[in-house]
């Protein structure tokens, strides 16, 4: 689905539209027309059960969110090899209004959400393989 960026992704203020494609149950791909920039996104609830935040009023207004179930929250993931060396930005989620096609990046207050980082290591949130110590 194509989304209009009403709250730009930091550093990409001139990109106004993105295509969002679901890869599987956990991962998504966000791409601007023409292919750049492109982001790998992850569902936060697949990694941590404590991920919740209050959407700032200005963001809810810009996104025109009327119901909570219209919101799809995803986080930018910086991929690395092996996968557990990847990092996730939990402090600046992307919020998509699935009802009207608007999206944006919301930068949360680090003082209010001290457990959320901009580059949290994925290995913190995935179980260690059996036999590993």
Image: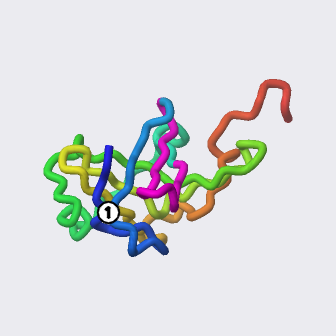
Q: Quadrant of the C terminus?
A: top right
Which of these two is toward me, 34 or 101? 34
Residue drawn at (79%, 25%) of the image: 130
Asked which secondary structure carries label 1, the reply is: strand
Residue 128 in which image quadrant: top right
Q: Magenta stretch?
A: 25-40
Which of these two is toward me, 36 or 46? 36
Residue drawn at (48%, 70%) of the image: 110
Residue drawn at (46%, 50%) of the image: 30
What is the residue that sits farthest to the left in this orientation? 66
- Measuring from the top left, give residue 6's x and y in whole percent: 27, 66
Please tell me whether residue 11 is drawn above or below residue 105 in the rendered image.
below
- Measuring from the top left, give residue 29's x and y in whole percent: 49, 45
Residue 54 in which image quadrant: bottom left
Query: Which residue is under mark 1?
Result: 5
Q: Is residue 73 left or right of residue 60?
A: right
Q: Residues within 10 Å of mark 1 (few under 14, many from 20)?
A: many
Residue 111, visible in the rendered structure: no
Instruction: Based on the picture, tell me whether residue 124 belongs to the magenta stretch.
Output: no
Residue drawn at (77%, 46%) of the image: 81
Instruction: Based on the picture, tell me whether residue 26 belongs to the magenta stretch.
Output: yes
Q: Is residue 35 left or right of residue 83?
A: left
């Amino acid at each position: 689905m194509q989304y209009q960026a009403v709250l730009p992704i930091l550093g990409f203020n001139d990109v106004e539209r993105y295509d969002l494609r679901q890869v599987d149950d956990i991962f998504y791909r966000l791409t601007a027309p023409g292919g750049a920039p492109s982001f790998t996104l992850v569902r936060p609830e697949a990694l941590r059960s404590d991920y919740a935040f209050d959407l700032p009023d200005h963001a809810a207004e810009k996104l025109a969110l009327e119901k909570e179930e219209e919101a799809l929250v995803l986080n930018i993931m910086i991929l690395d090899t092996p996968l557990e060396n990847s990092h996730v930005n939990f402090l600046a989620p992307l919020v998509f209004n699935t009802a009207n096609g608007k999206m944006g990046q919301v930068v949360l207050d680090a003082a209010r959400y001290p457990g959320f980082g901009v580059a949290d290591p994925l290995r913190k949130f995935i179980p260690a393989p059996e036999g590993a110590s």
